[in-house]
Image: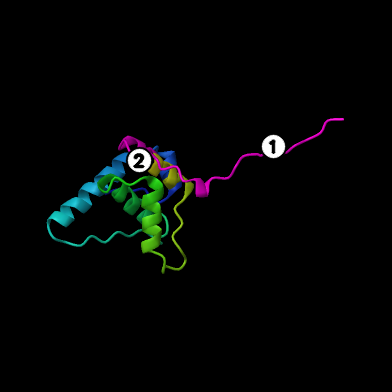
Amino acid sequence: MDVPETEKKCIDSKVNMTVLFDQFCDLVERGRKAGKSVLVCSAKGRNRAPAFCAAYLISKERMSRQQAVAKVLEQMNTMRPAPNISDFMQRSLMRYQSAKGIQGVHDTSHTIPLFSIKRTAWT
């Protein structure tokens, strides 16, 4: 697989991450069918590797982006510094989830109310 080194290169060359995620999932599936383990790594292992693992879970386990990212972060919880999937990769994963036809999960525990109305008096 030919993944650009940096997100800036991905953005500048308008790389379609959905295609890369699909290629990655096919590669992992070929390895699993052959009875092999698949090592997923990136330069620091904090952004791209976890994002591609989350894409695999979205594709093969039919998880939402939030569930997939949470599962990957849970499995990598002893890594220091901790994984940090960038906004670009998060948006790419959201597009990938939509392309796979998976509905997002609405979790109210992560929702912040935009505003609240209190009783007011006009004089």
Is label 2 in a helix, a strand or a loop?
helix
Reading the image, the residue beneath label 2 is 97
**Mark 1 closeness class: few <14, some 14–19, many ≥20 residues within 10 Å:** few
Residue 22 screen position, x and y as percent: 26, 43
60 with respect to 97 (left or right):
left
Reading the image, the residue beneath label 1 is 117
How far apart marks 1 and 2 lie (CA) works out to 35 Å
Which callout, 1 or 2, points at the residue further toward the start of the chain?
Answer: 2
Quadrant in the picture for the C terminus: top right
Is residue 117 located in the magenta-colored stretch of the structure?
A: yes
Is residue 38 located in the magenta-colored stretch of the structure?
A: no
- Residue 16 visible? The answer is no
Could you tell me which residue is drawn at 38 percent across and 38 percent down? 95
Please, is residue 67 above or below residue 12 in the view?
A: below
Residue 55 screen position, x and y as percent: 32, 48
Looking at the rendered structure, the kind of residue marked 2 is Gln
Could you tell me which residue is drawn at 42 percent across and 59 percent down? 46
Figure coloring: rainbow
Cβ atoms at labels 1 and 2 below 8 Å apart: no
Mark number for residue 67? none
Disc count in the image?
Answer: 2
Magenta segment range? 95-123
29 with respect to 49 (left or right):
left
Residue 43 screen position, x and y as percent: 38, 60
- Residue 7 visible? The answer is yes
Could you tell me which residue is drawn at 65 percent across and 39 percent down? 115
Using the rendered view, name the quadrant where residue 116 is placed: top right
Observer-side mark, 1 or 2, equals 1
Secondary structure character of the magenta stretch overall: loop
Most distant residue in the left direction: 34
Please tell me which residue lies in front, 94 or 88: 94
